[in-house]
Image (tube, coloured by chain):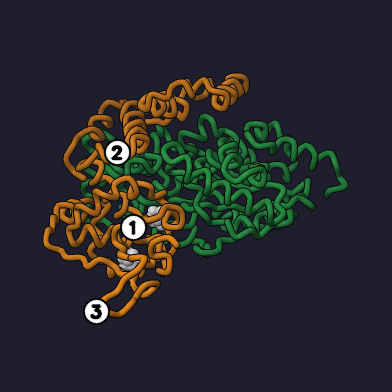
Chain colours: A orange, B green
Amino acid sequence: MAKGSGIIERSLLQDDQIMEEDNLVMDGIDISGRWNTMLKTRVHSERDLDSWDDVRASAIGESIDNCIQCGMCTAGCTVAHEVPGFNPRQFIYWVRVGRKDDLIKNADIIWRCVGCYICTNHCPKEVNTAEVIESIGQWLRKQVPEKMDQAYLANHEAYRHQLETYGRLSLPRLQAEFLSKLGRQKELFGPDLRQAAIRMLKDGRALKTLLIGRPRHWNRSRSVLMESGQT
Amino acid sequence: MQTAYFPGCSLKTIDRAYDVSTRVIAQDLGMTLVDVEDYSCCGAGELKGEGLKSHFLPARNLAHLINQGETEVMVSCNVCYHELSRTAYAVKQGGVHLDQIQSMLKAADEPQILEQPTVRNTLEYLVNVIGLDEIAKRVRVPLTGLRVAPYYGCLYQRPAKMLSSVQIAGEDTEHPHFMHDLMAALGATVVEHRAETTCCGGKNLLSDEKISGRLTGRILSTAKSSGADVLALMCPKCAGGLDALQFRAIGTVGESAQLPVMYYTQLIGIAFGHRPEELHVGDMESDAMGLIRQFLSEPAIR
Ligand code: SF4
Ligand code: SF4
């Protein structure tokens, strides 16, 4: 049997949080089997509250302090049902108690939030949970970009670059930039996308896309978007 | 009746089917749509990580709306609807965020937001402002016998407190029903399938192929196994995963995810007697065209 398989909501726990031996005798008593499943004691000796400071200071993360850790967000979360270890309630907890190591260890999981806002809708304390999770993801992107998924980074950068440069989104152009950032340009000419491209050339949608243009005096808006500072 | 309208980038380009069908039915219903001038992208949900700056693009559009002398705007795309509503909500909250939004607009030489804008979703607008009776009166080709599975996705009803569909129109956040009601008014058989508001994973459509394949696969196969002929959509981002990249869903869960997908506005257009070509039904990657042709040519299934 897999480690900790008797635990309810097992997928919400990390493997290394669970202690379980095949055979265990303590003080002369054999406690092999289910009774020797234990969770590691967590000792908060090292707190690093950077994440908390940053998240609550950001416009999208400022509601984090309303959280009462009730878990409604995780209960309804789309991704919690798909990705083991994805647990918005716990991410908020880690941020607030300064468990930077846990956040970083899960950098490749936290970004997988799909922004469905079920959590925000269910939260009884008016936490905008979806945006708090986004804010935590952004914090990680800035702290440990090397730990983040390449596709996530490419997606983020491609969107930002397209929006800043053109002020309007051309999806084929976005997809081309995304794929080339990952060195996957070839897929643009692969069977799936090529077929769609040919169809769009024929039916006039490709032309519409090319002619999308920019908003008037876009340069000024562009510099506002590119200015660093406010978060 | 004049109505301000915000189509947004994808409706202006590859999702023209949604834009054209919205315009066609609006005209039938006696509405005159006036586009928000000099539009920019709404941010597509992708700039939220930039914090306050994520309000800049929606605010720019809302400022243009107010500048045009309108305070209410109708939006078909659910992502634009969400982004514009989110910023309109920030405007309503006022305070320091609003000040910062206004100063960003000023720095960009754009007009200020001088009145409270109201953002309305086309679906909710059709049901509540135009009315189901009016819509039913225009039906020339009842969709009798066509089994339609309504699919709302996320952003039409979540987060509730920012959205007019819930706040003004009283849509149910857990079990929305305006599209159900609308399809019934067209004579269609409405299929309940319990994936009406499940997320398609659209935000990570490009970056997280595995999850998006699983989520879209589940929605399509749930609708299909509930007996649907077609899934009715209201969001171009959902269309990306459920229609354009349906092959990925099929690759993940199998043939059970193969299902024609259309915008609900196209179905209204068909019921109003328009030809499928006029509504760009052929733009859909799934075989919506085949289904509609068959439906129109075989009175037996009606
Ligand atoms: S639902 Fe709200 S209060 Fe409850 S744990 Fe999640 S964020 Fe915190
Ligand atoms: S927005 Fe993200 S964290 Fe919230 S329920 Fe959806 S996937 Fe989960």
For the residues marked 1 and 2, what is the alpha-carbon distance in whole angstroms? 54 Å
Viewer-nearest of labels 3 and 2? 3
Is residue A11 depicted above or below B108 in this figure? Answer: below
For the residues marked 1 and 3, what is the alpha-carbon distance in whole angstroms? 26 Å
Label for residue B111?
2
Image location (x, y in percent) of residue B10: 49, 34
Marks 1 and 3, the one that precedes in the sequence = 1
Residue A163 in sight from this viewpoint: no
Label for residue A27?
3
Q: Which residue is mark 1?
A: A15
- State which quadrant residue A149 falls in: top left
Amino acid at the residue labelled 1 = Asp
Q: SS for tag 2?
A: loop
| Residue shown at the point (42%, 52%) measured from the top left | A83
Q: Please tell me if label 1 and label 3 are on a single chain.
A: yes
Q: SS for tag 1?
A: helix
Amino acid at the residue labelled 2 = Pro
Is residue B265 depicted above or below B40 in this figure? Answer: below
Q: Residues within 10 Å of mark 2 (few under 14, many from 20)?
A: some
